[in-house]
Amino acid sequence: MREKRPATFLGLFDIPLKNARFVILPVPFEATTSCQKGTKNGPDSIIFASRYLELYDEQLNTSPYLTGIKTLPPVMPDKNLDTMSSKISKRSAQYFSKNKIVVGLGGEHTITLGLVDACIKTCGKIKVLCFDAHADLRDTYGGTKFSHACVMRRIRELGCNIISIGIRSISREEKSYLDTSEGIKILWAHQMEGDEWNKSLNNILPSGIYYVSFDVDFFDPSVLPETGTPEPGGFYWYETVNFLKTFIQRKDVRIAGFDVVELSPSKKFTASSFIAAKLVYKIIGFISSRNNPD
């Protein structure tokens, strides 16, 4: 029975690090969530739900877990926000430096800063592709520069070019910053209506090494309601995963790492946590099969 397997992603038995292409890094951190609380429970809920996923992917006609997936101990929270970011960076750099694809499970969106910092230090010049309903470009929020509402601004300060897609909520302060800054491109949700956004977006995304950050409020609340700050006008399952498949399997793109953040589950197992777990496994599958697209 799957439920008697280890409390790891997909319920997989542990493997040596050298045999793992992907490492799952839970980061149950929550300190600046501004609406619905509970993101600290996201990693545990995603891992629990993942144990009920089928290991075979019918879209890819393969079982992506065979590539090698290892679940790591969580990065435990630190009350100091700056220290927490450094802690995440130091921990994840151990795996980026060994050419592992690091999969961060949040936790609030703030965790992405430490993951991207480590990715830059080990992979060099990267681009950040962010799926989100919110711009997250404030300078400070709630009295801190290390809020979930500031994470993309802090990442831009690391020197990364950022492409954020699906944005449908932004403050005037953020819009002013955006209008006077280079290195940040936003594709607004209202520009992504219809069936053509998948193709047109891939046409404008440059080649290179990417870190992908996926805030689950990118989805429409009718798909995934259990997130800290849901926004109407979001996106649906197949249009999202089909875009990810097309993008990830491009020959001129390499994914160095990714995260899934801002799940706020109401209990251990929910439909939202199952969707988030399946999203993680889908992305792993697309990366694993990128040399053999169907």
Image (cartoon, helix red, strand yellow):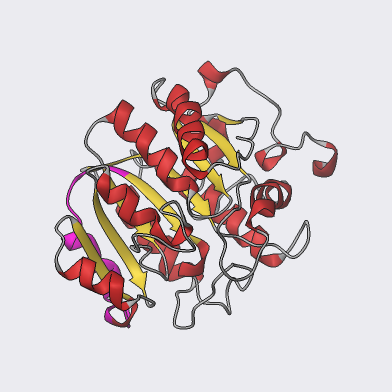
Tell me if residue 70 comes above or below residue 179 in the rendering. Answer: above
Name which residue lies at 68% across and 49% down. Answer: 50
- Residue 210 position, x and y percent, is 30, 44
In the picture as drawn, the residue positioned furthest to the front comes out as: 143
294 left or right, relative to 261: left
User: Which quadrant is the N terminus positioned in?
Assistant: top right
Q: Give, as a single range, the part of the protein colored magenta.
A: 191-210
Tell me if residue 189 comes above or below residue 107 in the rendering. Answer: below
Asked if residue 245 can be seen in this view, the reply is no
Callout count = 0
Q: Nearer the viewer, residue 91 or 163?
A: 91
Magenta stretch: residue 198 in it?
yes
270 left or right, relative to 74: right
Asked if residue 104 can be seen in this view, the reply is yes
Name which residue lies at 65% across and 62% down. Answer: 264
- Residue 289 position, x and y percent, is 41, 41
102 left or right, relative to 128: right
Name which residue lies at 46% across and 25% down. Answer: 95
Magenta stretch: residue 131 in it?
no
Q: Nearer the viewer, residue 248 or 71?
A: 71
- Residue 106 position, x and y percent, is 57, 49
Q: Nearer the viewer, residue 39 or 280?
A: 39
Tell me if residue 105 comes above or below residue 262 in the rendering. Answer: above
- Residue 288 position, x and y percent, is 43, 38
In the picture, residue 274 is in which quadrant? bottom right
